Image: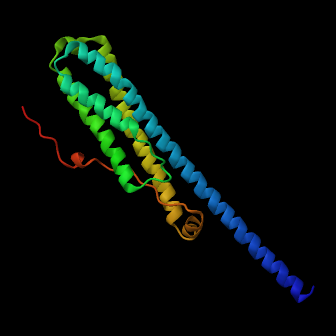
Amino acid sequence: MKKSTLTIIIVVAVIAIVALWMASGYNGMVAVQEEATTKWANVESNYQRRADLIPNLVSTVKGYAAHESETLEAVVEARSKASSITIDPTDITPEQFAEYQRAQAEVGGALNRLMAVAESYPDLKANQNFLDLQQQLESTENRINTSRREYNEAVQMYNTRVRRFPNNILAGLFGFERMNKFEADESAKQAPKVEF
């Protein structure tokens, strides 16, 4: 075999190995990115479920606590604001992510105030429709928490993949950037005051 033929075979083999490595690395990053975006969609789906429960909850409370209109309006306004924010998890800035988290925290806070108002109305607390909605809301909040945790785990896998060498080279070439995780709301860092 001639030396030039052997050189060509070696060059072709090296190119084939590099191409296979690039394809494998690229496909691996796509897979973990898709996993993370699917988990994000689950988070949004659960937030949407909560948003869908709010009108029924507000109308049920409105019938019993009509003079609590400020609280009811705050819930509706927070829902509207949170529902208007749409995010592409593969192309999100930290500022957009923080805005999304703030909007969802406002909904949670407004719902907590609504539930506190409901405590003042024994007839409302005994209403089966309200009890069902309250149970569905609690279940939804648990789903949201689980979805956010699963999203953070998927983002961790993705971020680890795109930051490790040599995948970080491919990530740079093909535009794979780190994704943001959910973090605790600022208010969660302080212990709540309990008064008896």
Using the image as rendered, state which of residue 58 and residue 3 is in the foreground. 58
The color scheme shown is rainbow
Side of 83 where 17 appears, left or right: right
Query: Where in the figure is residue 95, as x and y percent of width and height?
Result: 36, 54
Residue at 60% across, 52% down: 31
Residue 93's place in the image compared with 172, above or below, is: above
Horizontal arrangement in the rendering, residue 122 relative to residue 132 (left or right): left
Q: Quadrant of residue 11?
A: bottom right
> Could you tell me which quadrant the N terminus lies in?
bottom right
- Dividing the picture into quadrants, the one containing residue 8 is bottom right
Residue 78 point in image, percent of width and height:
30, 34
Side of 8 relative to 111 (left or right):
right
**Which residue appears at 38% of the width and 55% of the height?**
94
Q: Residue furthest bottom?
A: 3
Residue 7 coordinates in the image, percent (x, y): 83, 84
Quadrant of residue 129 within the rendered picture:
top left
Q: Residue at x 46, y 55 (%)?
A: 179
Residue 70 image offset from top left, x and y in percent: 19, 26
Quadrant, the C terminus: top left
Residue that appears at 55% across and 52% down? 33
Q: Residue furthest left?
A: 196
Q: Is residue 37 above or below residue 44?
A: below
Number of numbered discs present? Answer: 0
